[in-house]
């Protein structure tokens, strides 16, 4: 039984290492500094007729989970931004904005987005400046 247990542990460690390598490769293709200075502020921006993304996504347990902004602060710390970046990276297909859930889910279905987004369609069109900012970040990550 001990031998079987060691095999399971080795297999688990190997699978974890492969996952970490795959994530590291993905995260390396996405530019953190562009994310932090241009993309992440969009999640804290008030859009007419909508709540800021952070209002819902800091309190939920969805794939797009954002860290809570510290009381008295208006933005995330670098450590919080890195955690946000890790979560957001799972929703991005580098080089392919149309294949990236981060861009498709909050986009109006009239312009290629999902049929439902609990926060409403943050982006009415792919021509929206903020949508374009995120799309350009995704495109640069090839």
Image (spheres, rainbow, N blue to C red):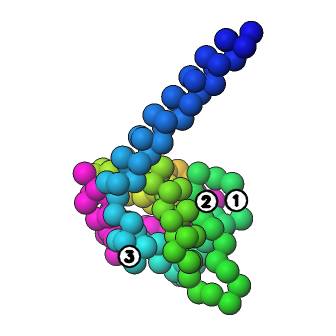
Residue at horizontal 53 percent and vertical 56 percent from the top:
87
Q: Are marks 1 and 2 in contact (CB under 8 Å)?
A: yes
| Separation (CA) of disc 1 from disc 2 | 7 Å
Tell me the number on the disc at residue 65: 2
State the extent of the magenta-drawn residues as a range: 117-142
Residue at horizontal 71 percent and vertical 85 percent from the top:
71
| Separation (CA) of disc 2 from disc 3 | 18 Å
Instruction: Depth check: give the residue in front, 4 or 120.
Output: 4
Quick check: is 58 in the magenta stretch?
no
Q: Which residue is mark 1?
A: 60
Q: Earlier in the sequence, mark 2 or mark 3?
A: 3
* Mark 2, secondary structure of its residue: loop
* Residue 126, percent from left and from top: 34, 64
* Mark 3, secondary structure of its residue: helix
* Mark 1, secondary structure of its residue: loop
Q: Residues within 10 Å of mark 3 (few under 14, many from 20)?
A: some
Q: Are marks 3 and 1 in contact (CB under 8 Å)?
A: no
Tell me the number on the disc at residue 38: 3
Residue at horizontal 47 percent and vertical 51 percent from the top:
91
Instruction: Depth check: give the residue in front, 40 or 122.
Output: 40
Q: Earlier in the sequence, mark 1 or mark 2?
A: 1
Asked if residue 137 can be seen in this view, the reply is yes
Asked if residue 130 can be seen in this view, the reply is no
């Amino acid at each position: 039984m001990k031998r079987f247990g060691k095999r399971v542990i080795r297999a688990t460690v190997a699978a974890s290492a492969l996952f970490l390598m795959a994530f590291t490769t993905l995260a390396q293709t996405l530019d953190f500094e562009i994310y932090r200075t241009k993309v992440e502020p969009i999640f804290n921006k008030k859009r007419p007729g909508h709540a800021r993304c952070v209002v819902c996504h800091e309190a939920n347990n969805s794939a797009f989970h954002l860290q809570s902004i510290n009381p008295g602060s208006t933005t995330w710390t670098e450590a919080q931004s890195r955690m946000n970046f890790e979560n957001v990276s799972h929703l991005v297909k580098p080089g392919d904005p149309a294949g990236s859930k981060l861009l498709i889910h909050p986009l109006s279905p009239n312009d290629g987005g999902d049929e439902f987004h609990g926060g409403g369609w943050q982006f009415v069109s792919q021509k929206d400046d903020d949508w374009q900012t995120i799309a350009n970040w995704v495109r640069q990550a090839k």
